[in-house]
Image: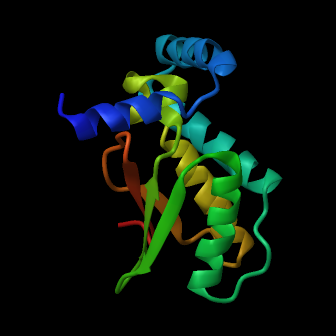
């Protein structure tokens, strides 16, 4: 492992408070034993929507304001940050340094990021996007981040 990868691994492992690591990893393993991946993703998306309702955004009119409001919440919670770009037919969201691997372990990379889909879906609906536009994960998840998309489903 090179130095950069070692540094990333070191800090990634510390993104989850030690008193929660064993509990959350055990929870993740139970979910993996009991539910197929589609149901785990659905569950985490629902958790994310509840998360978004618990931490609503202030009224925002511009994309920069939305990004700032989201990042104020993420930074306060040590959940990384998001960069949002306006593409031709969708918004591209790149969420960096979410503590999901530290909390749920490497095997959860296939389903834990759905919590971010739920949070962002809730926030964009709260801001008036409506339910026709959907937030979907479009990249794999790793210690650095995950890419999501807000747009009309394909």
Q: Is residue 38 visible?
A: no
Q: Looking at this view, is 143 or 104 the one in front?
A: 143
Up-down: is 115 above or below 139? Answer: above
Residue, x 60% and y 51% (percent of image)? 118
| Residue at x 64%, y 55% (from the top left corner) | 75
Question: Does residue 145 sit above or below 104 in this rendering?
Answer: below
Viewport quadrant of the C terminus:
bottom left
Query: Residue 110 placed where, x, y %?
Result: 38, 34
Q: Residue at x 65, y 65 (%)?
A: 70
Can you name the residue that lies furthest to the left here? 2
Left or right of residue 131, residue 86 in this image: left
Residue 71 x %, y %: 62, 64
Question: Residue 85, relative to residue 110: is it above or below?
Answer: below
Left or right of residue 52: residue 148: left
Q: Which is more toward the observer, 75 or 86?
A: 75
x and y percentages locating residue 108 in the rendered image: 43, 27
Q: Nearer the viewer, residue 81 or 9?
A: 9
At 47% across and 27% down in the image, what residue appears? 13
Q: Colour scheme of this structure image?
A: rainbow
- Report the number of numbered marks: 0
Residues 107 and 125: in front is: 107
For the question of whether residue 21 can be seen, the reply is: yes
Residue that protrudes farthest toward the front in the picture: 3
Q: In which quadrant is the N terminus drawn?
A: top left
* Quarter of the figure with residue 3: top left
The x and y percentages for residue 15 are: 55, 34
Q: Is residue 154 placed above or below 98 in the rendered structure?
A: below
């Amino acid at each position: 492992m090179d130095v950069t990868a070692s540094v990333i691994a070191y800090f990634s492992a510390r993104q989850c408070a030690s008193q929660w690591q064993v509990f959350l990893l055990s929870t993740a393993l139970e979910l993996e034993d009991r539910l197929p991946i589609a149901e785990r993703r659905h569950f985490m998306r629902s958790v994310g929507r509840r998360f978004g309702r618990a931490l609503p955004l202030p009224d925002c009119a511009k994309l920069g304001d939305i990004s700032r409001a989201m990042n104020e919440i993420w930074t306060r919670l040590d959940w990384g940050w998001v960069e949002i770009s306006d593409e031709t037919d969708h918004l591209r969201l790149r969420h960096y340094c979410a503590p999901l691997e530290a909390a749920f372990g490497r095997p959860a990379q296939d389903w834990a990021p759905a919590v971010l889909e739920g949070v962002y879906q809730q926030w964009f609906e709260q801001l008036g996007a409506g339910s026709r536009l959907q937030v979907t994960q479009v990249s794999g998840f790793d210690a650095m981040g995950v890419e999501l998309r807000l747009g009309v489903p394909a």
